Image (cartoon, coloured by chain):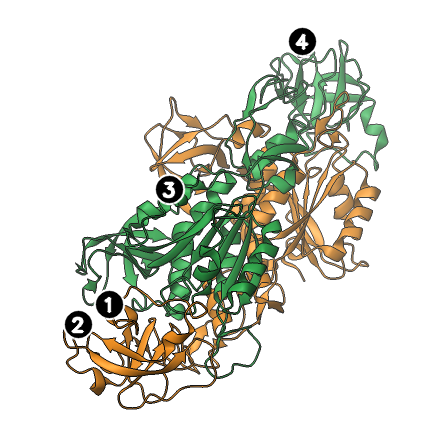
Chain colours: A green, B orange
Amino acid sequence: MSSAATRATGQEHLWSVSEHLEDILATVRPLEPIELQLLDAQGCVLVEDVTVPVSLPPFDNSSMDGYAVRVADVAGASEEYPAVLTVVGDVAAGESELLHVGPGEAARIMTGAPLPPGAEAVVPVEWTDGGLGEGPVSGMRARSASPEAASGQVRIHRQAEARAHVRAEGSDVKAGDRALSAGTVLGPPQIGLLAAIGRGTVCVRPRPRVVVLSTGSELVQPDEALGTGQIYDSNSFALCAAARDAGAIAYRVGAVADDAETLRATIEDQLIRADLLVTTGGVSVGAYDVVKEALSSVGDEDEEGGGIEFRKLAMQPGKPQGFGSIGPEHTPLLALPGNPVSSYVSFELFARPAIRTLMGVEDVHRPGSKAVLRADKALTSPAGRRQFLRGRYENGEVTPVGGAGSHLIAALAHADALIVVPESVESVEPGTEVDVVLLG
Amino acid sequence: MSSAATRATGQEHLWSVSEHLEDILATVRPLEPIELQLLDAQGCVLVEDVTVPVSLPPFDNSSMDGYAVRVADVAGASEEYPAVLTVVGDVAAGESELLHVGPGEAARIMTGAPLPPGAEAVVPVEWTDGGLGEGPVSGMRARSASPEAASGQVRIHRQAEARAHVRAEGSDVKAGDRALSAGTVLGPPQIGLLAAIGRGTVCVRPRPRVVVLSTGSELVQPDEALGTGQIYDSNSFALCAAARDAGAIAYRVGAVADDAETLRATIEDQLIRADLLVTTGGVSVGAYDVVKEALSSVGDEDEEGGGIEFRKLAMQPGKPQGFGSIGPEHTPLLALPGNPVSSYVSFELFARPAIRTLMGVEDVHRPGSKAVLRADKALTSPAGRRQFLRGRYENGEVTPVGGAGSHLIAALAHADALIVVPESVESVEPGTEVDVVLLG
């Protein structure tokens, strides 16, 4: 039985922000893992402990372009009294047949190439005459331009200790070591490591598929003409973008008119591609709040799925909220309010953590911080409500942007933080330290 | 003439990290802007100042579900002595035909619906009897369940000031205002604002297309069997992921064998989908360094395109670097060294800022910070080289991870910062404050 269902009697209870969030996080479960190609797993959470199958490096190899030598042969070598060795050939990276370096011999060797049998150290080419019989050289000539350079004699100008410029087999990781632990988020270096140990695919939780739809008969698509009483749909765009920002694959359904049957049918159609459904609008106390109307009945006992509960939250903006699950897979659904600022703030507070939970990420929350309020006058906040004002954060200070109105989307677009005013506080003086949520 | 070409004589000059970066940033130009669908423009930089075509809100509208009334009709109203008004009908959001509210009349109105002519204020439904003739109600019944509720009489329990619960036309933004300035990066709230003012498409610099290829005959694809002297290709995976992280669309070509003709042909093939080419390996002083061999000739005077210059940098890891432009479009190309750590650090220092420059982003750099070195013993660093060590950053402290070896990819995968040791410093004691680059 879902947590929402167990609290079904609480219709008039004013939920705190924390209670609502806890309910969501207690209900939403991480997605089942799947095996993905490495680059498809970027940003995803590893669900397996990955063990190193073969040591890195897999063999002793040269860290420089130079000559593989025996230590005794170059003992005491200097530019004035070079060691003169016979070059037995090239050892390039990727070559499978190895030369043997005997006494008095050297092999020209490239960075990453295996140290040939017999050799004990590598002398960088800059410490030799490069086989040209003149002074020190700054590098080798390209093999294609000068194929004869891997024969004849080379003068070595410095002595070398055993293992000098040699990267030992297993000096990075050893076979059997743990490369990465379950729970690791796969960024570029982790993907690099997995490739380096030969993993072409990896078992991770996939990106959640989030379906976003806005509701409202007043909503018109951008670029279309605006009639009397109409406004443009912005929520489905903003929340799609926010869902992607959170790590999801987002599908924008667009605006659905205020008709319960249409809405119900649309949601049922979308279930097949949704790990999470997010709707906006239609959740308040009006006679045309069709999300409430359409989804309240979904949880009937004779239907499959959990049910959506509509609540009032002790917050501003974002008082009316719906949450529950729907359909045969019990797909979680968040029904957010329709005002643009309310829906965006609600998304940040509730949908983003839900998405991060589906991904299996450990830390599902935006970073919080403290900041000193910079303002001309005190901020006011309704008693008993946690208020989220828009602000700009810089160097430990936050400045409110726009007012408290939940329709002020232009101000939202110039904010990069939410200023949190707790339930118990009705006024915040300039200079006071406040909690902020950093959106950037 | 490219900056690389003007410095073509400087083969033996040891470039500083800053000089090399400056040369790259002086050469790479932001991509030409294109018109994109809003959601395709996420993360992109706006190149136009966007003006508001129609005020937001476009009309006076209700901020609550309630009743639109005339102020005089509800003067002095209380629960004990309610104002009794005749309900003339519903005003729902999106309705184009408006009622008129005369003296003694009220219209039931929904959040977002236009304030009907004659009405001066909105009284929330919770401050009325909802037309049911009993006490205060907590909301309206759904229109579909109770179509008769928009007629009869309503008792209003509180008086209202003029414009109460009315959002004035243009109170968010006014027609002619600047909504967003050129240079703005489009995140979710900015996309929301653009949609809200009716913009379905927007003029931005597109995401750069970055082609990543690694070179080396020793490289094998992950999941394939490893032969003698072979290692897995990891650079093309790590750098593809890093390019995406920076905001690019990345194409992984994979590993190309050490053959100059093959490499040249591959690069020429890829040019058509590249705004930036990134190669790894083959840039040092070895006889099989084919990137150097293949691309040094591309800048011949009788060929189109700029030319690639190969340099030595005063840095560790990442001493050998190539940079220039190639092909008829003078596509920028960064030839990074082949050791996994060298290539990744070089990408962070040079390729990422190049990608951010192509995007037109103002701040192209990773955030830097100061941190106190937490270590058992002093860090050592070669004189005259800027060293970038891998570290873990937490609460103002940074702890080195792994050693200085440029093959230590496992350590890199557990780091989240680079510790920067300046050219002039050869030893850093524990407890010293150091510069760090935060990779997260």
How far apart, in angstroms, are the residues tagged by discs 1 and 2? 8 Å
Disc 4/disc 1 C-alpha distance (Å)? 101 Å
Please tell me which residue lies in front, B393 or B141. Answer: B141
**Chain under disc 2:** B
Residue A6: image tag: 3
Q: Amino acid at mark 1?
A: Pro
Q: Amino acid at mark 3?
A: Thr
What's the residue at 78%, 54% (across, down)?
B300
Q: Judge whether A268 appears above or below B340 on screen.
A: below
- What numbered label is drawn on residue A72? 4
Q: Is residue B240 above or below residue A399?
A: above
- Quick check: do tags 4 and 3 share a chain? yes
The relative height of residue B84 versus residue A278 in the rendered view (above or below) is below
Instruction: Name the chain letter of the residue that bears numbered label 4.
Output: A
Q: Earlier in the sequence, mark 1 or mark 2?
A: 2
Mark 3–mark 1 distance (CA, rounded to whole Å) = 28 Å
Residues at circles 1 and 2 in contact by the CB criterion of under 8 Å: yes
Q: Mark 4 vs mark 3: which is more N-terminal?
A: 3
- Image position, residue A283 (x, y; %): 41, 61
| Element type at mark 4 | helix
| Residue under numbered circle 2 | B79
Q: Position of residue A254 (x, y in %)?
A: 56, 65
Position of residue B336 relative to residue A12, above or below, is above
Q: Are marks 2 and 4 in contact (CB under 8 Å)?
A: no
